[in-house]
Amino acid sequence: MNKEQGLQLLEQTRVIAIVRGVEQKHISAVAGALLAGGISVMEVTLNTPGATDMIKELQANYSDKMFIGAGTVLDMDDAKLALDAGAAFFVTPNTDEDVIRFAAEHSIPIYPGAMTPTEVVKAWKAGATAVKLFPTGSLGLTYFKDVQGPLSHIPMLAVGGVRTDNIADYFAAGCYGFGVGGSLFNKEDIAAGRYESVTNEARKVTDCVQACLK
């Protein structure tokens, strides 16, 4: 899947699934379960054991259906690892302008994490595709609204604390999209091969998002 197709998928779905701590033997089945639930954009965090091999596996099995990236890209070393693994986009928890420029130079969409207005603007000027306001769960909806006030020209993702009962509020505040992690993945169900639990949780999120987009 090329960059334009991937960005179009995110435009349609507005959700990035954050896969952290899933064992490699489950990763393809988890990806399939997400896709069945309507989520076609996913990141594998680099602090997950075997992450780069998982990204390679997913690109081999799902690149025609899903936009697959690397998360928790902290620095240039991580960025190079993610690039070599074939990640189609990068997500970071921090604002590292070198990493952002590196991604832009390689035509890789990047969603860097930022907390303050200064960080948001720096990330955007360095070449961010959109900025991940993080941690949204701690900062809260009011903070998101306050930052969006003067910076509404910068597309922002809410990551951390995103639930089906607050997605509509974040959309109303100007949020472009969401990163959703732990609520999608019941580790016990995944270990037991009950991947339908991932599909069910993904469907709840995508149904809520699509209702807001109508």
Image (tube, rainbow, N blue to C red):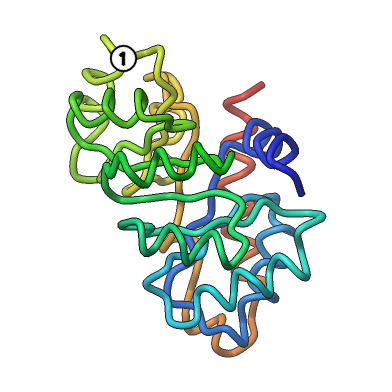
Position of residue 199 measured from the top left corner of the image (x, y, whole percent): 66, 63
Q: Which residue shows up at 28% across the image and 44% down it? A: 96
The answer to whether 9 appears left or right of 108 in the picture is: right
The answer to whether 78 appears left or right of 151 in the picture is: right
Q: What type is the residue that disc 1 sits on?
A: Leu
Picture layout, residue 197 above or below residue 133: below
Q: Which residue shows up at 82% across the image and 55% down it? A: 64
Q: Could you tell me which quadrant the C terminus lies in?
A: top right
Total number of numbered discs in the rendering: 1
Position of residue 48 measured from the top left corner of the image (x, y, whole percent): 42, 75
Q: Which residue shows up at 64% across the image and 31% down it? A: 11
How would you rate the neighbour count of disc 1 (Cα within 10 Å): few for under 14, some for 14-19, many for 20 or more? some
The answer to whether 69 appears left or right of 95 in the picture is: right
Which element carries disc 1, helix, strand or loop? Answer: helix
The residue to which callout 1 is attached is 151
Position of residue 72 measured from the top left corner of the image (x, y, whole percent): 37, 59
Question: Which one is nearer the viewer's eye here, 97 or 158?
Answer: 97
Residue 87 found in image quarter: bottom right
Residue 68 found in image quarter: bottom right
The answer to whether 118 appears left or right of 79 in the picture is: left
Picture layout, residue 143 above or below residue 90: above
Q: Residue furthest top?
A: 150
Position of residue 104 measured from the top left corner of the image (x, y, whole percent): 50, 37
Q: Which residue shows up at 79% across the image and 54% down it? A: 65
